[in-house]
Image (cartoon, rainbow, N blue to C red):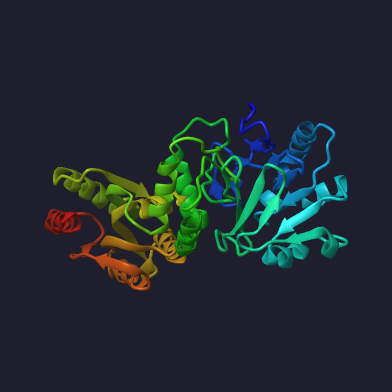
């Protein structure tokens, strides 16, 4: 991995993981993931978070090279999830006098992961607004509970004006991956942090008064330019607002007949002036991307076959996941299909009724087995209603 330059006194010691197949054992990461860790060199030396077990050896090499014979004074524990905290015990064993800096929740959870001797003497417990003086560099601690664990905190370094943002502003992909930030940051946000929009808004409010020149997350690239863009995206996402104009069609089709109806609807929508129409086959689509697009667009069509008098499993899974992630503020159309008793539309509506501010437009389009000429009028009406 190429050297990641932050500043003369703030060093990157993280690592790229190009071999991982599933992040958190569920999210596909075709371009891998980075585990970010940092060191601030001053009169006192602070290490900001450790790294995942998978990259322990590389992290230790980076740490030793950066320290160049010096001894770190503090380990800042921003987040206890194992992809960032696995090596807490490793660094204690290597540097027995290092102090652990965290908040009350940090030290409640820490013994659940590690059996650390003399923890009471070793820990430094900080609260919202507390400052750790390293010399020129001063770390101000900002509590960020449920972004996305209860113990999460971020740090603002006042001298170089750097926000160490924990999992906020993170993205999938290694640091040497050249790709658009928005797409993989959006997929990361809605699948991992998305449920906690209110808490993200609280964090954005806290840091809005700071003069931020750089954002250093625990995953993804260091953000140095056009910070307004990234902060604005987080503001939109955490308010559950519509980001992109267009229609997202999420289709769960057993034998392809429901999908054929969705293809026809896509044609009608485009003919009627829809700026963008995205059609996804939920049986083949990356599930995390389906979640991402359901939040990205303001107009959604949920189309599904009836299955065991319920709704076909991929659609049920998507809807329940969206409910868990606090899905809201969307305009929705429904297509159902069934041979003897179409019922999927009813189940979709029942699940949507548990969500906040979901406008269901009529008509619900009912297809019996295959799309027929007599169904076209209702598809036209649905297209008109969703675009109105």
Residue 77 as seen in the image, left or right of residue 334 = right
Residue 63 as seen in the image, left or right of residue 381 = right
Residue 119 as seen in the image, left or right of residue 286 = right
Q: Quadrant of residue 147?
A: bottom right
Q: Which residue is rendered at x = 66% and y = 47% of the image?
A: 138
Q: Where is residue 24 drawn, in percent x and y?
A: 61, 52
Q: Point out the residue furthest to the front here.
A: 136
Q: Where is residue 163 drawn, in percent x and y?
A: 57, 46
Q: Which residue is rendered at x = 57% and y = 30% of the image?
A: 176
Q: Quadrant of residue 379?
A: bottom left
Q: Which residue is rendered at x = 22% and y = 43% of the image?
A: 275
Q: Which residue is rendered at x = 15% and y = 59% of the image?
A: 378
Q: Where is residue 68 drawn, in percent x and y?
A: 81, 31
Q: Nearer the viewer, residue 119 or 284?
A: 119
* Quarter of the image that includes the N terminus: top right
Q: Is residue 283 visible?
A: no
* Quarter of the image that includes the C terminus: bottom left
Residue 170 as seen in the image, left or right of residue 131 = left
Q: Nearer the viewer, residue 376 or 186?
A: 186
Q: Nearer the viewer, residue 13 or 172?
A: 13
Q: Is residue 202 visible?
A: yes
Q: Nearer the viewer, residue 19 or 190?
A: 190
Q: Where is residue 165 drawn, in percent x and y?
A: 57, 49
Q: Measured along the vertical axis of the image, is residue 54 above or below residue 310?
A: above
Q: Quadrant of residue 183?
A: top left
Q: How many marks?
A: 0
């Amino acid at each position: 991995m190429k050297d990641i330059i932050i500043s003369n006194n703030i060093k990157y010691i993280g690592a790229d993981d190009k071999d991982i197949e599933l992040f958190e054992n569920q999210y596909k990461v075709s371009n891998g993931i980075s585990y970010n860790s940092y060191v601030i060199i001053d009169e006192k030396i602070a290490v900001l978070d450790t790294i995942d077990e998978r990259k322990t050896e590389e992290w230790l090499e980076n740490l030793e090279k950066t320290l160049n014979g010096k001894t770190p004074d503090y380990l800042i524990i921003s987040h206890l999830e194992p992809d960032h905290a696995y090596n807490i015990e490793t660094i204690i064993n290597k540097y027995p006098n290092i102090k652990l800096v965290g908040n009350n929740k940090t030290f409640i959870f820490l013994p659940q992961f590690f059996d650390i001797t003399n923890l009471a003497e070793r820990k430094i417990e900080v609260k919202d607004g507390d400052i750790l003086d390293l010399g020129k560099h001063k770390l101000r601690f900002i509590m960020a509970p449920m972004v996305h664990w209860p113990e999460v905190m971020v740090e603002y370094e006042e001298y170089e004006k750097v926000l160490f943002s924990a999992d906020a502003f993170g993205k999938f992909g290694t640091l040497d991956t050249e790709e658009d930030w928005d797409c993989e940051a959006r997929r990361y946000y809605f699948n991992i942090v998305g449920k906690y929009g209110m808490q993200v808004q609280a964090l954005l409010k806290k840091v809005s008064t700071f003069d931020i020149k750089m954002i250093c997350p625990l995953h993804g690239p260091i953000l140095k330019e056009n910070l307004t863009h990234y902060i604005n995206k987080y503001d939109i996402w955490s308010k559950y607002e519509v980001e992109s104009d267009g229609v997202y069609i999420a289709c769960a089709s057993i034998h392809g007949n429901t999908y054929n109806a969705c293809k026809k609807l896509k044609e009608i929508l485009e003919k009627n002036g829809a700026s963008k129409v995205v059609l996804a086959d939920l049986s083949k689509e990356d599930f995390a991307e389906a979640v991402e697009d359901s939040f990205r667009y303001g107009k959604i069509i949920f189309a599904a076959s009836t299955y065991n008098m319920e709704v076909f499993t991929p659609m049920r899974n998507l809807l329940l996941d969206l409910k868990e992630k606090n899905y809201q503020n969307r305009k929705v159309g429904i297509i159902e299909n069934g041979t003897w008793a179409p019922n999927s539309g009813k189940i979709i509506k029942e699940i949507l009724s548990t969500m906040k501010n979901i406008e269901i437009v009529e008509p619900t389009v009912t297809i019996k087995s295959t799309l027929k000429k007599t169904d076209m009028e209702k598809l036209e009406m649905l297209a008109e209603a969703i675009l109105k």
